[in-house]
Amino acid sequence: KSDERNLNNYFVRRLQKGETIKSFDCGDEDLNDFIMNRVDDYLKTMLAVTYVFEHKATGKIIGYFSYYSTKSVKQNIMRFGISKHHRR
């Protein structure tokens, strides 16, 4: 467990087209559904780019954020989720 609490054991990376996240639970069904089922549609249509926080050794995703691009810079939006098992 202490290995999972050390942030030096994680890195941030951009999700690629066609990549799927099979397991994620932040306690919010909408955020869980987005990362597991809809994130690729947003990437393919260039509506959002998503980055994940991933454990270096296990590949486990503990959080993510998505940056939504719109026509107006003032309307840019971010969405994020943190796995409920990794909150302090």
Image (cartoon, rainbow, N blue to C red):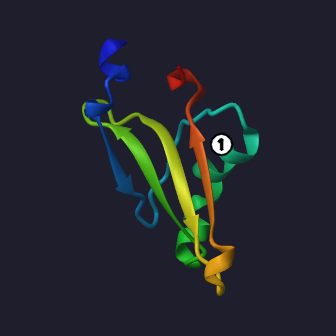
Q: Where is residue 39 in the image (x, y as percent from the top left)?
A: 58, 60
Residue 27 higher or lower than 29, as above or below? above
Residue most extreme to the top:
1
Q: Residue at x 40, y 34 (%)?
A: 60
Decide which of 62, 21 is in the foreground and name it: 62
Per the image, the residue denoted by label 1 is 32
Q: Which residue is drawn at 54% across and 75% down?
A: 44
How many labels sit on residues?
Answer: 1
> For the residue marked with disc 1, what is the amino acid?
Asn
Under circle 1, the secondary element is helix
Q: Position of residue 83 (x, y in %)?
A: 55, 32
Give the quadrant of residue 10: top left
Give the quadrant of residue 28: top right
Q: Is residue 27 left or right of residue 57?
A: right
Q: Where is residue 31 in the image (x, y as percent from the top left)?
A: 68, 46
Residue 44 higher or lower than 61, as above or below? below
Q: Is residue 26 left or right of residue 9?
A: right
Q: Position of residue 46 (x, y in %)?
A: 55, 78
Q: Residue at x 45, y 67 (%)?
A: 17
Residue most extreme to the front:
74
